[in-house]
Image (cartoon, rainbow, N blue to C red):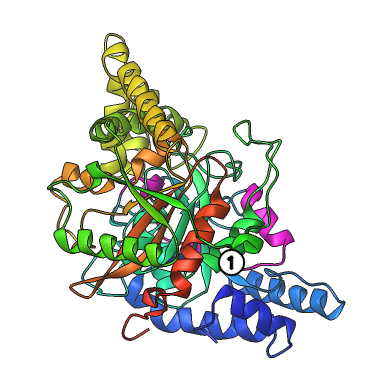
Amino acid sequence: MHHMTLAEIARGLADKKFSSEELTQVLLARIAQLDPQLNSFISLTEELALSQAKAADARRANGETGALLGAPIAHKDLFCTQGIRTSCGSKMLDNFKAPYDATVVAKLAAAGTVTLGKTNMDEFAMGSANESSYYGAVKNPWNLEHVPGGSSGGSAAAVAARLLPAATATDTGGSIRQPAAFTNLTGLKPTYGRVSRWGMIAYASSLDQGGPLARTAEDCAILLQGMAGFDPNDSTSIDEPVPDYSASLNGSLQGLRIGVPKEYFSAGLDPRIAELVHNSVKELEKLGAVIKEISLPNMQHAIPAYYVIAPAEASSNLSRFDGVRFGHRCENPENLIDLYKRSRGEGFGAEVQRRIMVGAYALSAGYYDAYYLKAQKIRRLVKNDFMAAFNEVDIILGPTTPNPAWKLGAKNSDPVAEYLEDVYTITANLAGLPGLSMPAGFVDGLPVGVQLLAPYFQEGRLLNVAHQYQMNTDWHTRTPTGF
């Protein structure tokens, strides 16, 4: 059962080949057996899962249908879940039980999904390796000595190891697409505003976006269908009709214009990944796509702009965690200043403290214009580059990451080296565009992903291209040894 995709599970449940309760029990046993190697879960919710599975089976027995009805998933541990720990991978929120469900959690529960647990993540979603979690690093199931990517590494590792078919994740600068690339999954960051952020604990509010992580584009279409939609509780949610993503999967790629930016193939890209990207281009050409070289001239400025904007927003968002209103409180404070200092010093890890300091500095008097305002102007230039490119092409294709997954601890002493791994993904967040990573091959036994970007609200186009590619390749079917 654990090798089935979300689509196969939906068909099996509809055909009464097994029940949701049977499937849930199999997967919970598998998590108990294998997750100690991976550390992909922070919390397991066995009682909730079994009760939801029984309820889903009852709904099906009464004639109800739905692709997600009875489907087991897990939530990244920054989606608030009522009565269940929502930690954000941080000591600061280790004891926090959310009093309500995030909109994404509520929508998926209404669709009949079964929540197996909450997945591990970089602390407050800050990281590209899933090593900054208070609960320890997550391991990559393809090689347990390597990182799974971050910040959604727990969701990625769990799905890649066949502990469950799909999971929710979030993407602030590549945190869905990069772990998808590192673990041989398909991961989709929707258009900013397509999926509600209400109840999703914020890192950088103008960049964060929830989305699906699964093995195939077909599965991502099914999960996104349940997640997407307007939410009046979220002021950044956009009231745009949600199409039937599964209905567009089988569209022809004949005449589709695919742009390949020349800036993507710089000295920083592993030449073996470049070769796999070119192989993907050839595969799509066989399916009728037309390839064109394009330029994104301001891409080189994206990383410095992102690493001013994101920490600036983080320093503001995380100011609420002070030991008084929210979060960890130190023992026996001498006075209010001591309470603030020690509560935040004890509650936040090194990477979170680093980004708060950078953000507070960038927003401080005398530096706002020099750093934050300038970064926002660069953000606009990045968006303009994409708008010009999409006048010429329908999709932009390139590598998801410049390198395959690195060894655990390899970049801990050099945070900037880790930041540079986000070079291809952060532009989509700065511009608010949808992006998808799909499996495209292996380097030294480690998975490699190819990234697709599309105009606003064209998630269906991304899923269509990825699905057609996956119908003609088998990279996405490969399973890590031992899982």
**Residue sitting at 25 percent across and 65 percent down?**
276
Compared across the picture, whether 474 is left or right of 77 comes to left
Region of the chain picked out in magenta, as a range: 101-127
Residue at the farthest top position: 366
Compared across the picture, whether 305 is left or right of 31 comes to left
x then y, percent, for residue 312: 36, 27
x then y, percent, for residue 28: 53, 80
Label 1's element?
loop
Q: Is residue 455 magenta?
A: no
Q: Quadrant of residue 50?
A: bottom right
- State the residue in front, 60 or 380: 380
**Residue sitting at 36 percent across and 31 percent down?**
385
Q: Is residue 334 visible?
A: no
| Residue to which mark 1 is pinned | 250
Locate the C terminus by quadrant. bottom left
- State the residue in front, 377 or 323: 377
Compared across the picture, whether 220 is left or right of 150 comes to right
x then y, percent, for residue 97: 57, 52
- State the residue in front, 469 or 357: 469
* Residue type of the residue flagged with mark 1: Asn
- Please say if 49 is above or below 187: below
